Amino acid sequence: MAEVIVAAGHILALRLFDVAYAIDLKRAEALWAGHAAGAAARARLSGTPPKAVAFGEPPLGIVLGPVEIDLGAETVRAQATARLYEFGAASIALRVPVAGRSWPDYVHLLNALDRAVSATAAPWDKLLAQLLGVMGAALERPDPSGLQEDYLIGVVQSFEGSAVGRMTASDLLAAVDLVPLLSGEHRPLSEAARADLLRGRFSYYADDLVVLTWDRAFIYEPRDDSDVADVLEVANAQLLEMRYYDELLDDELPRMYDLVERTRRGMNVFAARRYAGLARKLYTLVAEVTELTEKIDNALQVTEDVYLARIYAAALDLFRVPTVSAAVDRKLSIIRDTYTALYDEASSSRSEVMEAAILLLILVEIVLALVRH
């Protein structure tokens, strides 16, 4: 078989960070405009009609500039961009253009880039510091949790050589081996492992192909639409933030149990006040987490584009976003039930205090009546 050459394409390395409780995107846009002449604009999907796909609140896209990455055998130049999401996530992307490389060389470059950006935090930390150094005033309750997500995407627009012009998806799968790209492995995989990696395949036209895995994807898109890559980024951002709230509630539940126990041990006339104070704290936590998780869930609404909706749903399932979201809902439900119980106990304590006060007043009246007589 003749050698397949990637005529035009790129490699996209994504790293997503949880940086704040929320981000004021209008303020961030103004801050970046005042800082540099670099472009900053609200994101929209390039190849999909607006009525078919809608962002809950379109993220803010920013051009950070070129970055050189040392791969050992060579140094490549990447274009760095960023996106800010209103629910507190920041995404940084490194885009390395590829042209005139054989398919094995393209796969080798992708794996080398993955190793380079995974082995060191230097490019990511520097770019994140550059971004947050300007955007600090737009961050609401900035408190980087340290949580991160990364994703690697290989994109090809056209091939040449043995397949001049546009390949069909079937021709592409027959001409090249996608498994080394999707797995990052050099050793041959078993047939079961290969089948599992290639299970998440999607095509709409005869000449396009998307293959999804947990941490990588391959996109063959002759029309150079970036919609699929954008959707995968949003799904990763949703996973990141759901993981954050899942861990936040994991930490909060034991503290809540301790506070409830201490409140119950200190039974006195002020118990109602303590119950009410703790209930208000739990209600505030539930309200804040619920508000943000709803924004995360509604980050992207795909309505009329059935193909993109399938890819988006598959990515969410593959990244286990519904599972983590369900865990967050269960923990919120526990806190809501505790809030209700505390509120009821506070009301009961108030009633008991009122009853005791009434009985005391009656007793005083009786004593005063006896004294007068």
Image: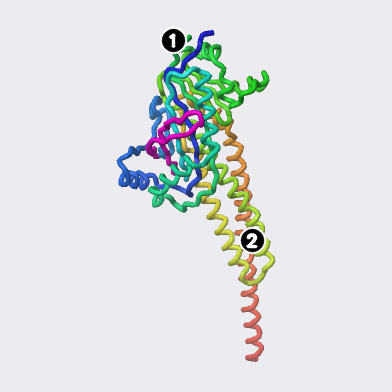
- Residue ID at (50%, 31%): 71
Q: Is residue 52 magenta?
A: no
The label on residue 164 is 1
Residue 187 x/y as whole percent: 64, 23
Is residue 357 shown to the viewer in this render? yes
Q: Is residue 72 magenta?
A: yes
Give the x, y percent position of residue 93.
45, 35
**What distance separates the C-alpha of mark 2 from that of mark 1?**
69 Å
Q: Which residues are magenta?
A: 60-87
At 46% from the left and 18% from the top, the residue drawn is 6
Residue 188 image-quadrant placement: top right
Q: Which residue is mark 2?
A: 259
Percent from the top left, x then y, of residue 358? Answer: 62, 74
**Residue 156, placed above or below residue 149:** above
Q: Is residue 285 above or below residue 111?
A: below
Count of marks, rendered view: 2
Residue 233: where, in percent of width, then height?
48, 34
Quarter of the image where the N terminus is located: top right
Closer to the camera, 51 or 34?
Answer: 34
**Dominant SS type (magenta):** strand
Compared across the picture, whether 227 is left or right of 329 comes to left
| Residue type at numbered disc 2 | Leu
User: Where does the C terminus fall, quadrant-wise?
Assistant: bottom right
Q: Amino acid at mark 1?
A: Val
Q: Quadrant of residue 99?
A: top left
Residue at x 61% of width, y 66% of height = 272
Q: From this viewpoint, is residue 310 visible?
A: no
What residue is at 57 percent from the left and 36 percent from the top? Answer: 321
